[in-house]
Image (spheres, helix red, strand yellow):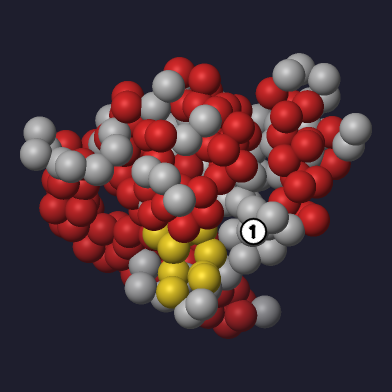
């Protein structure tokens, strides 16, 4: 029994050393990864280019406590287990993301590296550029602007509020909730009811807004 205990302790210590090294590597890359989104020369859509109605809707659906949480949020209704910060970490720091250790690293990097060093506004600009919107004819659709052009034939900043919200509705599962699908239509209806104040998420894990059916 004592031997098993020390094996577990050794394993835990090895894991902590490994994760510490991974955090060090992530920290060393962070400034370079986010530099384009801080630059005055950045040509893509920025967070403050969005109308307030669209920005507010995005935050309300995807990460209601975004501006106040420390990169991780395990208590806000509808937030799920992945904040916008964590989603960014997945897109920017991992070549291959797998459940388990990758999720642990994602959470640690979000809370201990990205959130303390990268302003929330810069995170949002990066998210506009990096979010995944599924695959169309074998090509990944990355970023809100590319998604707007693919699904609506116009740049992001030309979308109506309704069209923007339709893009937000895909983020929970882009290949499942593709615009035009029945599942997307159902989710969009739920989101509209959420935004109008007619319903609330059932709990932190209720990312599908199960209580918001019309």
Report the quarter where the C terminus lies.
Answer: top right
Indicate left or right for 127 with 64 as reference.
left
Indicate left or right for 23 with 137 as reference.
left
Indicate left or right for 56 with 29 as reference.
right
Q: Position of residue 39 (x, y in %)?
A: 11, 38
Crowding around mark 1 (Cα neighbors within 10 Å: few <14, some 14 to 19, many 20+) is many
25 or 153, nearer to the observer: 153
Instruction: Look at mark 1 in the image and give the residue it sits on.
Output: 178
205 or 173, nearer to the observer: 173
Q: Where is residue 150 in the image (x, y as percent from the top left)?
A: 46, 57
Q: Residue at x 18, y 42 (%)?
A: 43
Q: Where is residue 192 in the image (x, y as percent from the top left)?
A: 73, 29
**Is residue 151 something one can see in this rendering?**
yes
Report the quarter where the N terminus lies.
Answer: bottom right
Vertical side of 173 occupied by 2: above or below:
below
Location of residue 85 by image quarter? top left
Indicate left or right for 20 with 30 as reference.
right
Location of residue 2 by image quarter? bottom right
Q: Residue at x 80, y 46 (%)?
A: 186
Q: What element carries label 1?
A: loop
Q: Where is residue 169 in the image (x, y as percent from the top left)?
A: 63, 45
**Is residue 208 something one can see in this rendering?**
no
């Amino acid at each position: 029994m004592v031997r098993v205990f020390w094996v577990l302790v050794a394993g835990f210590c090895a894991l902590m050393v490994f994760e510490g090294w991974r955090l060090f590597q992530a920290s060393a890359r962070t400034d370079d990864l986010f530099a384009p989104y801080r630059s005055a020369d950045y040509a893509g859509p920025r967070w403050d280019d969005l109308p307030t109605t669209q920005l507010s809707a995005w935050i309300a659906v995807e990460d209601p406590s975004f501006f106040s949480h420390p990169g991780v949020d395990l208590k806000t209704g509808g937030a799920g287990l992945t904040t916008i910060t964590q989603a960014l970490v997945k897109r920017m720091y991992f070549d291959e993301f797998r459940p388990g250790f990758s999720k642990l690293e994602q959470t640690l990097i979000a809370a201990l590296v990205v959130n303390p060093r990268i302003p929330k506004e810069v995170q949002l600009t990066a998210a506009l550029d990096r979010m995944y919107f599924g695959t169309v004819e074998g090509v990944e659709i990355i970023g809100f602007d590319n998604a707007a052009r693919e699904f609506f034939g116009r740049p992001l900043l030309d979308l109506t509020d309704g069209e923007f919200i339709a893009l937000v509705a895909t983020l929970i599962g882009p290949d499942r909730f593709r615009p035009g699908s029945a599942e997307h239509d159902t989710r969009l209806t739920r989101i509209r009811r959420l935004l109008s104040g007619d319903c609330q998420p059932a709990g932190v894990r209720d990312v599908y807004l199960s209580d918001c059916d019309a």
